Amino acid sequence: MTTTGRRALLVAGASAAAAALTGCTSEDAGPRRPNAAEEAAAREAERVARAEAALRRRAVTASRTLLARYDAALAAHPALHARVAPLRASAAAHASALGEGDRPAPDASSGTPGPSSGTPGPGTASAAPAVPADPRAALRELAAAARAASDAHTAELLAAPPEYARLLASVAAAGAAHAYLLTEGARA
């Protein structure tokens, strides 16, 4: 076969392929409807997005609940400020990192809540949690709340997408460290 024959054969093959592809998409067939596989994929993507949004809401709620406990303890026991305020600032940063956007971070210089942080966000109770009159009991309750938040974040790890799971694991570890610092760390 000559070079011209090969070129003609290639051109003819390419033309046939183009004609076949053009024939597959007819303009007068009306708007294209998704097939069953595309519809199933879209439904699955929507289900995954809803599940992830719910997971994020639960994580933020757990962090906000802990943050409210810190705020209540600081309000009830101002003498604990030096010990508790840095942990409260860390908890506020965790809540923000997990998806909270409607409450400002604490003032960096003092570790105290920002101006509108007294306003509860969605998913938090409007009344401040009860705090024991004894500062040691208040610290034990804060430690229990930190452990509960840590456990809640840990429980969500398997359902979380990879990047969010890493964040949850980090926040859960920090919560466990807070619990230690609030109880055992004080004895050391």
Image: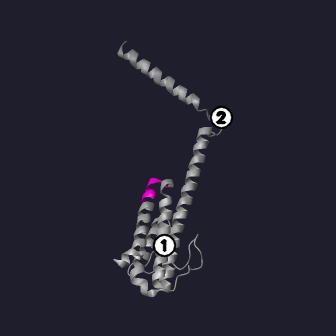
Q: Secondary structure at mark 2?
A: helix
Q: Position of residue 147 (x, y in %)?
A: 47, 69
Which quadrant holds residue 122?
bottom right
Is residue 141 depicted above or below 98 in this figure?
A: below
Q: Which segment is the magenta one? A: 160-166
Real-space CA distance between mark 1 and mark 2, rounded to the nearest whole angstrom: 65 Å
Q: Which residue in the protein does label 2 denote?
A: 29
Front-most of 124 and 157? 157
Which comes sooner in the sequence, label 1 or label 2?
2
Q: Residue furthest top?
A: 1
Q: Secondary structure at mark 1?
A: helix
Residue 102 visible, this angle: no
x then y, percent, for residue 100: 50, 68
Residue 177: x %, y % from top left = 40, 69
Give above or below for 1 relative to 117. Answer: above
Give the amino acid type for the residue marked by disc 2 in the picture: Ala
Q: Which amino acid type is marked by label 1?
A: Ala
Residue on which disc 1 sits: 144
- Which residue is located at x 40 percent, y 72 percent? 180
Q: Is residue 111 left or right of residue 128?
A: left
Tell which of 144 and 91 is nearer to you: 144
Query: Could one spot residue 66 in this view of the protein?
Result: yes
